[in-house]
Amino acid sequence: MTLSDFQRAMLAAFAARESGIGASLEEMKAIAYCVRNRVRQGWHGGNWLANLENADQYRGNLKGPHIPIDADSRPVQRLVREIDDIYFGLRESTNSPQAQTNGIEDSIGKCCYWLRANEPFSPWFVEKIIHDPDHHPLRMQMGTLYFYE
């Protein structure tokens, strides 16, 4: 196993847990894209593991109970298969059957923050992100997940 393999596995696990029980593949991928944006913008030195380890500092919601990953879940299995494209920044061909996933990447844009609207908000997130729409506009909503730049 290489460090890159480990980082991709950690990213997939993080996105699966962070999106919540019963989340769709699109929700998990959207969170993974936000983490990738943090890496690309140089957060924590552009280090994947440091960004994953420090993600709680930027939580939209108060930390809840540990969410187990359901390895039998079809969306989790698909996320694991597709995580390389997010990690390496590979865009899928518009001729592929999965071309609609480009819509997620395009919709997320430069977003680095997410919030689940049906769970208690972090006071830090409300003050720094929600109350500063000029610097952190709401870019996309996906069910109860909201994504901010």
Image (spheres, rainbow, N blue to C red):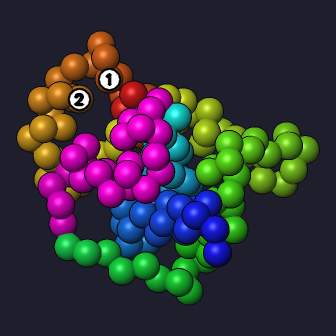
Determine which residue is flagged by label 2: 129
Disc 1, disc 2: CB below 8 Å?
yes
- Which of pointers 1 and 2 lies earlier in the amino acid sequence? 2
Q: Where in the figure is residue 38, as x and y percent of width and height?
A: 44, 38
Q: Where in the figure is residue 67, as x and y percent of width and height?
A: 31, 75
The amino acid on which the numbered mark 2 sits, given as a three-letter code, is Ile
Instruction: Name the residue nearer the viewer: 13 or 3.
Output: 3
Task: Based on the picture, tell me whether residue 19 belongs to the magenta stretch.
Answer: no
Give the magenta-colored segment's residue range: 41-64
Q: Callout 2 environment at 10 Å: few (<14), some (14 to 19), or many (20+)?
A: many
Question: Element at badge 1?
Answer: loop
Quarter the N terminus occupies:
bottom right
Task: Based on the picture, tell me whether residue 51 belongs to the magenta stretch.
Answer: yes
Determine which residue is flagged by label 1: 136
The amino acid on which the numbered mark 1 sits, given as a three-letter code, is His
Distance CA(mark 1)–CA(mark 2) = 6 Å
Count of all numbered marks drawn on residues in the image: 2
Q: Where in the figure is residue 133, as x and y percent of width and height?
A: 27, 19
Question: Element at badge 2?
Answer: helix
Q: Is residue 129 above or below residue 134?
A: below
Q: What residue is rendered at 31% in x and 51% in y?
A: 55
Q: What residue is rendered at 23% in x and 29% in y?
A: 129
Q: Callout 1 environment at 10 Å: few (<14), some (14 to 19), or many (20+)?
A: some
